[in-house]
Image (spheres, coloured by chain):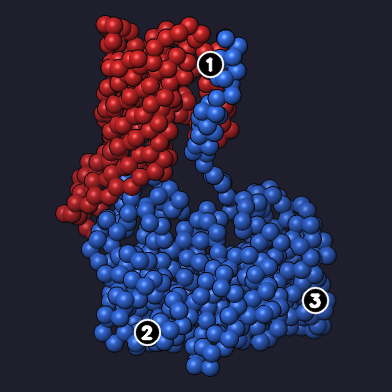
Chain colours: A red, B blue
Amino acid sequence: MECLLITPHFLLTIIMDNKMKKLILFLFSFLIIYSSVNAQTADSLYNLTVYAGGGYVRNITSFDYEYASLNRNGFLANLRVMWKPDYLIRAGFEVGRTDVYSLNEKDIQTDFGTTDLKTDVYAWSIMAVFSMSPFKNFEVNLGTGHAFTTVNNTSFGNESTSTDGGSAFMISTGYYFPVSKDLQLGGELRGMKIAKYDDYLISLQVSLAYKFLEW
Amino acid sequence: MIFLKKMLSIFNPVNYIIVIILLSNGCSNDLDVIFPEWDNGLLNSTTPLTNEMKARFEGIYNVEQGSDQFGNSVVVKWNGDYLSIYTGKNTGYFLLQGGKLDSTIYLQGLWRYQNNAETGLTQFSMTEGADYVLGNSGDSSGIKLKGTWGKNQNTPKEPVVLKFIRPIKPELLTNKFYIITHHGSGGGPEYLQQTENTIEIAKIIERYGANGFETDVRVSKDGIPFLYHDNTLNPRLVQKGSLIGEPEKYTFKELHTFVRLIHGEQIPSLEAWLDAVVTETNLEFIYVDCKPTAQPGLATIAAICEAARQKAASLNRDIQIYMAITTDDLFNAFLALPDYQNIPTICELSPDKLEQINSHVWSPRFTEGTQNSEVAALHSEGRIAIVWTVNIPSLMEQYFQDGIFDGMLTDYPTLLAYYYYGQ
């Protein structure tokens, strides 16, 4: 279980190495099956819980060339719906928006004269999420899906926008304490990889979890 | 009951589907390719070989030592200042520079397998047969290249000995056969020292056996034709920087200024690239592949190609420059251009459409076979045929044995050169 206490920052660093990435995923997968086999045996209800969160995100990618004005910090927000059966493993999906990075540079000397540069990059993601709660109030989530990254670039007196999609991967840990019978408030530390453009993001967010349906 | 529940859980296919999804997600295929370099300055003390000297030791050589690494026979051919040795085995090659010191010829450089990361330093000396090569006496039968090869930047210690068998058949050197690099990629942008579709790769691609270049043209948001292959600015071709997504969404100034290709080059305009090809290379055939999104810029591309042809003519450069019509949509758009039948084109569509736009070159896909009757019919009309994109060694051999094509596109020009000059 200790392996799940590794921070997403560290995870994102080591998952750049394929062998380590496979090892982490293997351990996580093993835990999923192990948890299923050792599922709770007492009868319990199924429920649907929605998580809404937002917070700070930082891009930890290594850039091949880095502008002085590169801003790696930003905000993210996400909405996740999880189906919680009486096994430890849960499944659901998540949509989110995150800043990726931005630039704001003045008086760049180019082959075409001097220009200012303003670039904003953000991504919308949609993921299938698998989750478990190995300890009380503590959750581990793993998500895989798609991210659509958009660039707004202004330079040479022109504004250009381009959007492209590709696979995305997320891992997070969260601690949620109950506020009422159906409502929990928590904090979540997460890492996300937007694979197509090799963007690695870590974030710290506050989330509300609301159990809106049970049967 | 508890046991039954556990068994159902462990055999629950959903668990295994999840595991498969997790394990299959996102493992990259990074390949770290190095290009080792000599730093001992040996060649500084030699004097350059003349073109006559170089021509005397071009030919087919038997590999007397080192055949496990480089195969049983190799092709030795000069391309400008570089001696290329095409090994065939593992799409291998040597790139060497050399000179003479007294009565010995020295060569230094690297060897590589084109389609993986194996590479290393290598060096040769020629004493046996050097008299003949230097024009003093003897004949070619005694030529022997003795050398060593190593791994990566290590000092080469493994022996390799090449024994001259015969010269390259003269007709293979005088006939026009086009070995056309597929956007100068070498099978992947990491396999060569420069990025595909750049001025920089065009300047060195002849060392790899190519005498033609297929390049990919798109049109920027402000109507400037530029060179780029993929549909998006992505890490396969572009360093991590500020812009991503479809390149056509940006102006050429943005692309040229804010995008760095993976070896650090800038995206060139078609105009600048053709100018460099005409003035700074000896390439003989340019295949301007108009990507489907280039449709609005066909007239501009045609004008730029024509300007390059005129510049080449003024310099007495032996070079053919053709726009390639690759899709029905492009074909229909091309029909709208004024005087389209007099624009030099390559047609990748049917022979009927080739006739309709009066293309000089037909370029079918390699999966269609040799198509000798169709190619012979084109030859009788003064046209030529070039097949794309041939990367499989057995197919290269087969097309040389059974086909009558006038050229081939390939990601591995060193391999195609091995089979062509080795005939």
Location of residue A136 by image quarter? top left
The residue positioned 29% from the left and 27% from the top of the image is A78
The secondary element bearing badge 2 is classed as helix
Does B229 sit left or right of B391 as displayed? left
User: Is B171 situated above or below A76?
Assistant: below
Could you say which is closer to the camera, residue B12 or residue A192?
B12
Does B114 sit left or right of B256 as displayed? right
The secondary element bearing badge 1 is classed as helix
What crowding class fits label 2: few (fewer than 14 Cα within 10 Å), some (14-19), or many (20 or more)?
Answer: many
Q: Residue furthest front?
A: B1
Could you say which is closer to the camera, residue B173 or residue A195?
A195
Q: Nearer the viewer, mark 3 or mark 2?
A: 2
Q: Which residue is mark 1?
A: A35
The disc labelled 2 sits on which kind of residue?
Ile
The residue positioned 16% from the left and 54% from the top of the image is A157
Q: Which residue is mark 2?
A: B357
Q: Rounded to the nearest whole Å, what is the CA distance between mark 3 and mark 2?
A: 47 Å
The secondary element bearing badge 3 is classed as strand
Q: Which residue is mark 3?
A: B165
Q: Residue furthest left?
A: A157
What crowding class fits label 3: few (fewer than 14 Cα within 10 Å), some (14-19), or many (20 or more)?
Answer: some
